[in-house]
Image (cartoon, rainbow, N blue to C red):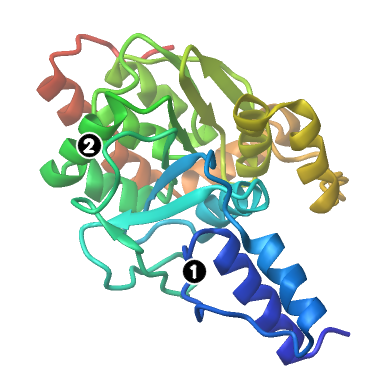
Amino acid sequence: MIDSLDRRKMLLALGALAGSAIAAPAQVSTGTKAGDDHMRQMMAIPPDAPKIAMLMYPKMVALDLIDPMTVFTILRSRIGLVWKDKTPVSTDIGIPIGATQTFDECPRDLDVLFVPGGIMGSIDVMGDASVLAFLADRGARAKWVTSICTGGLVLGAAGLLNGYNATAHWAVTDLLPLLGARHVDQRVVTDRNRVTGAGATAGLDFALALAVRLRGEEEARRVQLVLEYAPAPPFTSGTPSEAGPARVAEARSKRTWMDAQARRAAEEAGRRLGINASGAE
């Protein structure tokens, strides 16, 4: 069993590897010189480390952020968690997470711009001019413009998916055409320099696919091994086609109001962007 001290060391190491994306002291001591030297080597961010900006916002899904962030951390990337200010934002699991960079502090030229999901938070930022301006600005120059889950709607609202193939959480993929995107029913969709992922757990698949582009297949395979990512769910019910019509209908019946709000936000964004689409796939 891992005791609390060991857990703290692991979290500190993760924070240091992420370029201080998680608050951590400047140095992590293992109690021995050899151990400290090893930790410093593990934490060192190489000069050519990818620069990755991960948008944060209130009411986001924590898993949407943590899954890909873990992959990017093992890749020893230079990660910035970005929001308007550094006040911790709320998440779906009740654990607040604080940004490490404001919009103004975020580098202008990025290797990766990433947007997580969380439907109610996504709806809010789809109409937030400052968020959309930030995404449009950085997205215009980023090597890779990416999202998972309802973060795809946010990218679309910023005008960054118009004319691209894309995906998002299954419950809102019908809204992508309202934002100029063509929905492709795949877990991860790559179209030129846009990479979008489906619902929350697709964050690992998305990040590993992007890791190949950033560091090569062998390095991506190493990350998968480190994470022991070999999914074997107890049920075959993770997509609408697997779950079947009855379960999908039941799931949709519990989110009618939320999905209506998302459609309204997508329609408003589409009008603002001058996109003429019916929303039908």
Residue at the spot 82% in from the left edge and 47% down from the top edge: 229
Residue at the spot 32% in from the left edge and 46% down from the top edge: 122
Q: In the rendered image, which residue does mark 2 sit on?
A: 265
Residue at the spot 29% in from the left edge and 21% down from the top edge: 179
Left or right: 111 with respect to 265? right
Estimate how packed mark 1 is, as few (under 14), some (14 to 19) or many (20 or more) residues with alpha carbons within 10 Å: many
**Amino acid type, mark 1:** Ile
Give residue 207's position: percent from left, percent from top: 62, 38
Q: Which of 235 and 12 lies nearest the eye of the viewer?
A: 12
Quick one: SS at disc 2?
helix
Give residue 127's position: percent from left, percent from top: 16, 42
4, above or below 49, in the image:
below
257, above or below 268, in the image:
below
Let me know if residue 245 appears in the view: no
Give residue 211's position: percent from left, percent from top: 64, 34
Q: Which of 199 and 37 lies nearest the eye of the viewer?
A: 37
Give the number of the disc on residue 22: 1
**Amino acid type, mark 2:** Ala
The image shows a total of numbered marks equal to: 2
Estimate how packed mark 2 is, as few (under 14), some (14 to 19) or many (20 or more) residues with alpha carbons within 10 Å: many
